[in-house]
Amino acid sequence: MGATFVVTLREAFEASLILGIVYAYLDRMGGRRYYGYVTLGAVVGFLASLALGVTVTLLSGPLVDLGPDLIGLAVIFGAAALLTWHGWWMRQHARQIKGDVQRRLEAALTARRLWVVGLIAFTGVFREGAETVLFLWGLMSQATDTGTWSNVLVGVAGIALAAGLGWAVFRSGRHVSLPRFFAITSVVLLLVAAGLFSTGVGRLQGIGWLPMSEPLWDTSHILNDHGFLGSLFGGLVGYRARPSTPEVVAYLAFVALAGLLVVGPGLARHRRALALAGKRSREHP
Amino acid sequence: MLRRGVLVGALILSVVAGGTPARSADPPEIPLTIENHRFTPEEIMVTAGTSFVLVITNKDATPEEFESHDLRIEKVIPAGKALRLRMPALKKGTYNFIGDFNQSTAKGRIIAE
């Protein structure tokens, strides 16, 4: 039972963390009226998960053998790209924000990019959605007495807790300054995107499109990726106790290159500009 | 958009290492059964350096997910279905796998030597 709770909690939190961050982003950018786009993306992601689960269950053949793998890869690499793009925007925002006056302008800009935010919500849910749907459906089919039905409820409780945590992430986004909000969420999304990218590279090895290789190191004794915390970090930021060389290279290369886009050499200049603006506003209140 | 495509392409190219190991013309098929949320057999012996096909049959009434971090594979096998999983040539070693939907009972390993 504990295992069921942990599985659904982990899978759902990978989605709810992303949703919490994008809702918070809209909230801080004066785009609260655009929440619907995120909700729509998440709902479509859920429906797509159902559809994929049903398709895999009912159909057979080589298309079904490889199809979900290809869809999974497209979603993983697509999500990595979208999150990086979003992180790059936030950096653009951060450079321009000097006060509340800017927020109205930013809302207009945000509106033009709603489809990306909606897509991020979609990939966030769809990525692990099909699996979770099948897992819960399996539990429900097995439920013959109160004992096994309570297992289903435990699974649902895991999802509920994950939703609550996502909500907490969203609310906490209001309690930090705007520059700090951008800084923290940029780093989080960058790590998530890097984890996705290296997971995708690992999957390419798994399906044989990249050659298999030996693990570069083994940190199972420090953090076992089959345990709760280890698999949580595995799902969120791509932690592996025994990563292969391509996975490590992919992760580091992604952080380095995407990090340049998202955090970038402009940071030092930006900090000086903020410090100067702060100094000026103190001199002329 | 183009810049990002080039970026992603460059990243992918930067991790492709060496050539693909040679594949035998007719890879051996190894059956693996899921029954009562357990794998049978729980230990599979294979020859290192030879690719093979794992034929996983799910005899349970509920889906199972064959998952191996070591092999970087996550595949859902619906109830009553059989899945042919083409496995690459493995280096000597032990590769653990689990049934993600029934982790307490469904586990096993592939030993390549």
Image: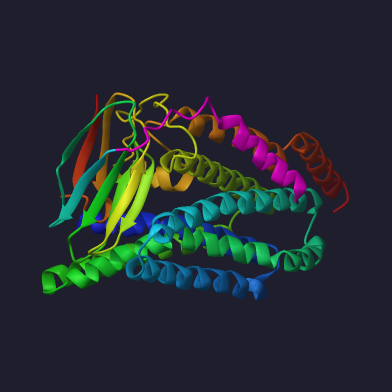
Which is nearer the eye, B84 or A85?
A: B84
- Residue at 36% in and 31% down: B89
Whether residue A175 appears in this view of the structure is yes
Whether A160 is drawn above or below A220: the answer is: below
- Residue at 41% in and 41% down: A206
- Residue at 83% in and 46% down: A277
Left/right of residue A109 with respect to residue A67 in the rendered view: right
Left/right of residue A18 with respect to residue A27 in the rendered view: left
Could you say which quadrant of the image residue A49 lies in? bottom left
Could you say which quadrant of the image residue A267 lies in? top right
Report x, y in % for residue B28.
27, 38
Whether residue A40 is in magenta: the answer is: no
Left/right of residue B43 with respect to residue A253 in the rendered view: left
Magenta segment = B1-27
Whether B41 is drawn above or below A108: the answer is: above
The quarter of the rendered structure image containing the C terminus of chain B is: top left
Report x, y in % for residue B22.
43, 28
Whether residue A162 appears in this view of the structure is no
Which is nearer the eye, B32 or A270?
A: B32
